Image (cartoon, rainbow, N blue to C red):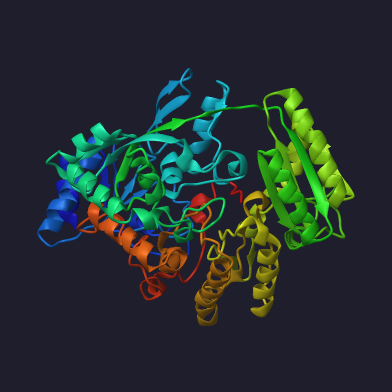
Amino acid sequence: MNKVANYLQEHISGEVMTTPSVRRYFSTDGGVFEVMPSLVVYPKNANDVRKITRFTWQLAEKGHVLPITARGRGSDQAGAAIGSGIVMVFPAHMNKLLEFDTKQRLARVQPGVNYRTFQDAVQTHGYFLPPYPSSIDFATLGGAIANNSAGEKTVKYGATRKYVQSLEVVLANGELIQTERLNKRELNKKKGQTNFEGEIYRQLDNLITDNWELLQNHTAHPEVSKNSAGYAIIDVKQKDGSFDLTPLLVGSQGTLGIVTEAIFRLEPYNPRTTLFAVYFSDLDRANQAVLQLLALEPSALEMVDSHLLEFITRINPNRLKGLVDPPYPAIVLLAEFDDAGENKRKAKTKRAEQIIGQYSERYARTEDFEEQQQLWAIRHSAAAVITHVEGNSKALPIIEDGVVPRNRFPEFITQIYALFEKYRLRVALWGHAGDANLHLQPFLDLSKIGDRQKVFKLMDEYYAMVLEMGGSTCGEHNDGRLRAPYLPKVYGDEMYQIFRDIKRIFDPYNTLNPGVKIDVTKELIAPLLRQEYSMDHLYDHLPRM
């Protein structure tokens, strides 16, 4: 591999590393798997990315497959930011906000831009990117694109895919393309090209045309409010014949192309909000309030359960003191309204109080920023789960992103409690009540054979439960290696074959992040399970969940 490293170092501007300690560092991400890369590259520009992908394409043509995995900060929890070939790390050099048009509310960025840095920059001009994940402090915008990330604002504003207007992408053979929505004439022009880009447009258009009825059939897709599983093929071609690769590439986890630039559309930012913290005695009352509050379009509708509050109190008795006291309510709901028009926000607030009063006798309401930060600490205290250690047991992100139809939310929680009781595991829930998208991480010891076996038993039962309710395996964290084996059950065999065809069209030699999304089985990922789980490479930031 040193010959390959030397060749690449001679031809690109960035750095190429084969040092064992560097490779070991990039052998893990935020998930439970470990894959040692052959070398690590820090590209300086899109030309570097083109040269590297062209080189691996030429190797593949000769029968030697050297995979490429694009990587941001490595916070991915599903094993999509690790790979056995070249790990291409973007934050070192390709980390700039290139252009910001305040009139059109557009920002052009490189993939290695830190999300928090970007958000702070655009907020000073009165705008923000709404679907920020809880890992905003250390995640990159490239990672958000790869996963179609979402977060606490998604209940009102939608996920990342909605805000990506266009992309600059390096294809598997090294061609650089720009994506945007094309009309029929522009599409036909693309299909007439003799290069690889033209071939992709021709084959993909034929694939969509041949399967149009299936793609338009709602039963072929989970009926949930947010979903990052699979490929978003349904959003590519519209009924008017217009065509856009952008939504397909967003959420594809680097398996179809490598993003080198993106243009985001932003929303106006209003720092003046109204926040409710509502305490419910039972799940059904909480759910009824959630369903009615949704009609008011809250900007956030988040929750934690009593088990999380008890866990936080046990490990840090003063963390929630004065915010919520025992005996703890079944559910604490955080409901926020951020409408720019003060009269509109006041009207919503008044109606929200009426709804809340029907189902809860205790709540807090505030417009004060400092008081809001204190109340948000209830929700953000979930970070303590992933940083806590009990002996050799640690919270594992293996069943942490299921989403179900909103009307199944109480049943979802009840069945999770039953599953954890069956395996005699401590349970704690938090997440996005407005989207019926929950996060939970069981404490297990990966050095024990029994616990390692329990990982896959838990996954099988949990995802079967989610799918039985008509849900999706991932609302916002995407498939990766972890959930890819369940994709055929999420969409069915016909849709899964379409996903396979998409991967083949874009990546015929399987050089772009193989082992993620398509043709992944539990037999393939089981040997990759770590012997010990940690997130040491993220300890320079306090993670939020």
Please provide percent x and percent y for residue 405. 61, 58
Picture quadrant of residue 541 = top right
Residue located at (41% from left, 53% from top): 216
Give the percent coordinates (x, y) of residue 538.
51, 50
Q: Is residue 12 left or right of residue 521?
A: left
Residue extending farthest bottom: 450
Drawn side of residue 237 relative to residue 33, left or right: left
Q: In the image, is 274 to the left or to the right of 93? A: right
User: Which residue ends up furthest to the top in the rendered image?
Assistant: 103
Residue 324 visible at all: yes
The N terminus lies in which quarter of the figure? bottom left
Residue situated furthest left in the rendering = 62
Q: Quadrant of residue 285?
A: bottom right
Q: Which of 104 and 522 is in front in this view?
A: 104
| Nearer the observer, 13 or 183 | 183
| Residue under the point 58% across and 58% down | 403
User: In which quadrant of the rendered view does residue 523 lie?
Assistant: bottom left
Of residues 94 and 428, the one nearer the viewer is 428
Q: Position of residue 142 (x, y in %)?
A: 41, 42
**Place of residue 484 in the rendered image (x, y in percent of width and height, measured from the top left):** 41, 64
Which residue corresponds to the image point at 50% horizontal and 81% vertical from the top-left? 449
Above or below, 12 relative to 211: above
Residue 26 shows up from this direction:
no
